[in-house]
């Protein structure tokens, strides 16, 4: 039981230390994640605009080619018209020529629209690219800031985690549940008795309870805050450096 109380107190010290290390990093990891997501979104936008431009250019090239083919056809129809045997054949060719001319003029209008659309799309793309580049710069700043902090805290954090695993070895699942339950509610779960008071809530601990706690044979909790009480002796003995 005494070992259990020591381990609980050690766990408290280690977790407080780990919380402080995490606090050093603050919301930087979250900020980096958010920026990365935002960046992926912008890149997707740029890709969509690129595809739009590419599809438009291919469509335009096809219409240009077809227009040239139609111009050739019109020339042929006109030549054929010189050899027709009757009005009916002549009118049929005139009709073909008109249809081809209509198609060409429709294509011309569409190609003009394409030029406008391509210019707009390129402007939009340049805007998004600028936004992306600014974001990328910000992201790189945050990342190197995070790397610096991680570099200094990582080693210590790993060491503390190892010590924590060790401390957990002498605790049961129930002990840990109690510890976590109090810690969730009170930020700290274990309070040494200092100057006859609970060092968690500063209320006086009755002399009889102080004596009981000193025996180290049961888990006693502060009557006021519910924290697990440990003796001043254990608190002096257990340190993390
Ligand atoms: Zn208390």
Image: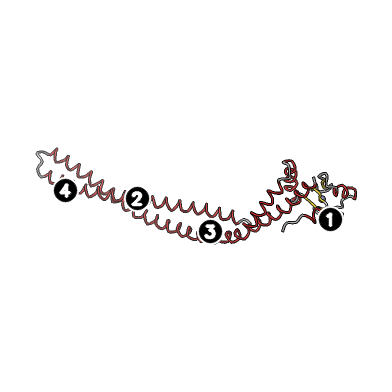
Question: Where is residue 63 shown, x and y percent of the image?
Answer: 28, 48
- Of the 4 image quadrants, the one containing the C terminus is bottom right
Q: Nearer the viewer, residue 106 or 118?
A: 118
The residue singled out by tag 1 in the image is 194
Q: What kind of element bears circle 1?
A: strand
Q: Are marks 3 and 1 in contact (CB under 8 Å)?
A: no
In the rendered view, tell whether residue 36 sits above or below residue 177.
Answer: below
Give coordinates of residue 226: x percent, y percent.
Answer: 80, 46
The dot on residue 222 is none
Which tag is nearer the camera, tag 3 or tag 1? Answer: 1
Residue at image position (22%, 45%) is: 100
At label 3, counting other C-alpha atoms closer than 10 Å, the crowd grade (few under 14, some 14-19, many 20 or more) is some
Between the residue at mark 2 and the residue at mark 1, the CA separation in whole angstroms equals 78 Å
Q: Report how far apart the C-alphas of labels 4 and 1 lie in the structure.
A: 107 Å
Q: How much space separates mark 3 and mark 2, taking CA atoms?
A: 33 Å
The residue that appears at 48% across and 53% down in the rendered structure is 42
How many numbered dots are placed on residues in this image? 4
- Judge depth for marks 4 and 2 and give the one in front: 2
Which of label 2 and label 1 is nearer to you? 1
Q: Is residue 48 left or right of residue 114?
A: right
Label 4: how many Cα within 10 Å (few below 14, some 14–19, many 20+) = few
Q: Is residue 198 left or right of residue 164?
A: right
Q: Name the residue under label 3.
A: 139
- Of the image marks 3 and 2, the number of the one nearer the N terminus: 2
Numbered badge on residue 75: 4
**Circle nearer the N terminus (4, 2):** 2
Q: Earlier in the sequence, mark 4 or mark 1?
A: 4
Task: State the separation of the CA atoms marked 3 and 1.
Answer: 47 Å
């Amino acid at each position: 039981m005494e070992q259990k109380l020591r381990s609980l107190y050690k766990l408290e010290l280690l977790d407080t230390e780990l919380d402080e290390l995490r606090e050093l990093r603050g919301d930087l990891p979250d900020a980096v994640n958010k920026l990365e997501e935002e960046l992926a979104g912008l890149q997707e936008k740029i890709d969509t605009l690129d595809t739009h431009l590419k599809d438009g250019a291919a469509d335009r090239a096809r219409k240009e080619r077809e227009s040239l083919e139609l111009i050739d056809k019109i020339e042929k129809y006109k030549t054929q018209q010189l050899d027709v045997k009757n009005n009916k054949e002549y009118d049929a060719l005139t009709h073909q020529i008109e249809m081809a001319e209509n198609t060409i003029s429709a294509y011309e209008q569409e190609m003009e629209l394409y030029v406008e659309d391509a210019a707009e799309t390129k402007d939009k793309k340049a805007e998004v690219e600028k936004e992306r580049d600014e974001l990328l710069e910000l992201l790189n700043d945050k990342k190197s800031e995070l790397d610096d902090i991680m570099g200094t805290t990582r080693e210590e954090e790993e060491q503390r985690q190892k010590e924590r695993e060790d401390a957990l070895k002498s605790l049961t699942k129930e002990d840990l549940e109690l510890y976590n339950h109090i810690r969730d509610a009170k930020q700290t779960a274990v309070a040494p008795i200092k100057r006859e008071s609970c060092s968690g809530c500063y209320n006086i601990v009755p002399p009889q309870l102080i004596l009981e706690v000193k025996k180290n044979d049961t888990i006693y909790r502060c009557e006021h805050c519910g924290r697990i009480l440990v003796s001043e002796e254990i608190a002096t003995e257990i340190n993390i450096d």
